[in-house]
């Protein structure tokens, strides 16, 4: 009997386009930015409506479409730095900062006072505030530059034209030249980037306070943040019947994929699907210095185990994709929880455990990912039923998931973590052996042991990261 993933891959995958996959995975980018689910998709609908009002060039519109969908591709790369600077949940900080006009010094100061060291002892908070006051401009440039460069790099690795990468890189540039990271001004800012920033702000204020708030904010920032001609065009289109209703959650993904310009419509083949999974693995692992390379290492270990167990090439290919994306739900967990050096408290542990459910929730949105979603989302389940998120046990846990779990545990032990140094492979295997039959499948463990020479030959845990 074919697995769901094999059946889906064989029938549904050839009919898919790249837009379907990126639109689905964009929900993970929303998590990292602290935005309501569907933010990237709503910004795409707004931006494409505006783009078509201003231009009928199919190439420019194709570039715009993917600039909008991937505008937040680098969003995870500054999460740890934001946590270190502000001492709070970087998702909330990002969410709130998107409502601040950074050209308004008073608004910017209010934001810093609200978020820097909130809840900390006054001495520590005072030190944070003083550091941000002294170095704020340079720190802001550093944070945005990291985000923009990482995002543009991911877009390039996904195979998009340089124009799309340039649009993502310039997302935070402002019409008046006071944006970042390069201080581009006016028409020196790529056309797609100008639209993407406006669409982003429109969605943020619409979600926060409705159409009137979005309308007022776009008008207020015309000539400073936004190209005045684009702000005027937005004012003309947002009053059209059905404009705001098109952003409703039901059917959102279908509406976005339906408007992909044919000039850049990219059919999805197996190789490109692999590239997308690798690109989003980079997004996932960029969230924390301690997870750098984790997804690729787990994938490598799982594939070596699967090879030893005799899985077919197709099953191994889907397993590798699941390995690359198994922690996508961690984009919805605060860096302060992920990088905490000590034991997690009850609320923190609940937040951490939620990442497995988020992984499945994101991947299951696309039918072709259905089997992979269940496989990846269950990688913290245990054979004895004491795992999470569903408490599956025994035969309820598929072989691919058991393989992923084995690879994930091995990497957790052999890689450096906030609370301890990396372990040698032999020590990690000894610890894992104590959990055979309860947390770890004995056959998967035996296959890992047999594959260890090949793993060590590849450089061990620390070297398998790209």
Image: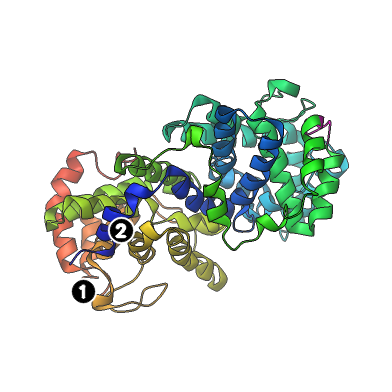
Q: Position of residue 144 (x, y in %)?
A: 64, 35
Q: Is residue 197 left or right of residue 1?
A: right
Of circles 2 and 1, which is in front?
A: 2
Q: Seen in the image, is 425 located left or right of residue 215? A: left
The quarter in which the N terminus is drawn is bottom left
Total label count? 2
Q: Is residue 194 magenta?
A: no
**Residue 167's image quarter?**
top right
Mark closest to the chain's N terminus, 2 or 1 = 2
Local packing at callout 2 (Cα closer than 10 Å; few below 14, some 14-19, many 20+) is some
- Observer-nearest residue: 430 or 214? 214
Task: Report the magenta residues as a range.
Answer: 222-228
Which secondary structure class fits the magenta region best? loop
The CA distance from mark 2 to mark 1 is 31 Å
Q: Position of residue 400 (x, y in %)?
A: 25, 62
Identify the residue under disc 1.
437
Residue 8: mark: 2
Closer to the camera in the image, 190 or 388: 190
Label 1's element?
loop
Q: Position of residue 261 (x, y in %)?
A: 54, 38
Query: Quick one: SS at disc 2?
Result: helix
Residue 226 colored in magenta in the image:
yes
Mark 1, Cα crowd under 10 Å, few <14 / some 14-19 / many 20+, is some
Which residue is painted at 46% across and 60% down in the image?
A: 365
Q: Nearer the viewer, residue 136 or 200?
A: 200
Q: Can residue 335 be seen by looking at this rendering?
A: no
Residue at image point 40% right, 60% down: 367
- Position of 101 with respect to 154 (left or right) is right
Residue 388 appears in the picture as rendered: yes
Q: How is the image coloured?
A: rainbow
Picture coordinates of residue 369 (x, y %)? Answer: 37, 58
Quadrant (top left/top right/bottom left/bottom right) for the C terminus: top left
């Amino acid at each position: 009997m074919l697995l769901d993933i094999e059946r889906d891959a064989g029938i549904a995958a050839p009919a898919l386009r790249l837009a379907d996959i990126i639109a689905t995975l964009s929900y993970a980018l929303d998590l990292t930015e602290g935005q309501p689910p569907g933010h990237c998709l709503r910004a795409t609908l707004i931006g494409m409506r505006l783009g078509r009002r201003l231009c009928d060039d199919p190439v420019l519109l194709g570039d715009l479409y993917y600039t909008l969908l991937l505008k937040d591709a680098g969003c995870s790369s500054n999460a740890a730095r934001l946590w270190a600077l502000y001492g709070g949940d970087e998702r909330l900080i990002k969410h709130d900062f998107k409502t601040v006009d950074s050209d308004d010094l008073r608004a910017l100061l209010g934001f810093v006072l609200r978020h820097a060291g909130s809840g900390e002892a006054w001495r520590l908070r005072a030190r944070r505030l003083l550091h941000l006051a002294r170095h704020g401009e340079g720190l802001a440039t550093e944070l945005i530059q990291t985000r923009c460069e990482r995002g543009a790099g991911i877009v390039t690795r996904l195979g998009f034209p340089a124009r799309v990468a340039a649009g993502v890189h310039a997302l935070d540039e402002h019409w008046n030249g006071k944006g970042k990271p390069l201080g581009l001004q006016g028409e020196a800012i790529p056309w797609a980037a100008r639209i993407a920033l406006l669409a982003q702000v429109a969605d943020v204020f619409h979600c926060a306070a409705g159409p009137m708030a979005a309308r007022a904010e776009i008008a207020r920032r015309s000539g400073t943040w936004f190209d005045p001609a684009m702000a005027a065009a937005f004012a003309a289109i947002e009053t059209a019947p059905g404009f705001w209703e098109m952003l409703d959650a039901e059917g959102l993904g279908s509406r976005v994929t339906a408007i992909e310009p044919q000039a850049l419509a990219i059919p999805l083949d197996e190789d490109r699907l692999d590239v997308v999974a690798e690109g989003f693995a980079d997004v996932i692992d960029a969230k924390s210095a301690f997870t750098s390379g984790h997804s690729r290492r787990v994938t490598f270990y799982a594939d070596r185990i699967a090879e030893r167990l005799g899985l077919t090439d197709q099953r191994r290919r889907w397993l590798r994709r699941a390995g690359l994306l198994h922690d996508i739900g961690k984009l919805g967990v605060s860096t302060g929880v992920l990088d905490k050096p000590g034991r997690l408290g009850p609320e923190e542990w609940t937040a951490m455990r939620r990442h497995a459910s988020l992984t499945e929730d994101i991947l299951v949105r696309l039918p072709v990912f259905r089997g992979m979603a269940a496989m990846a989302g269950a990688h913290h389940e245990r054979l004895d039923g004491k795992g999470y998120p569903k408490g599956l046990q025994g035969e309820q846990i598929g072989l691919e998931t058991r393989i992923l779990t084995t690879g994930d545990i091995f990497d957790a032990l052999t890689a450096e973590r906030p609370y301890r140094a990396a372990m040698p492979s032999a020590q990690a295997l000894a610890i894992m052996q104590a959990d055979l039959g309860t947390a770890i499948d004995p056959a998967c463990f035996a296959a890992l042991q047999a594959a260890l020479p090949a793993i060590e030959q590849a450089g061990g845990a620390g070297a398998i990261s790209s």
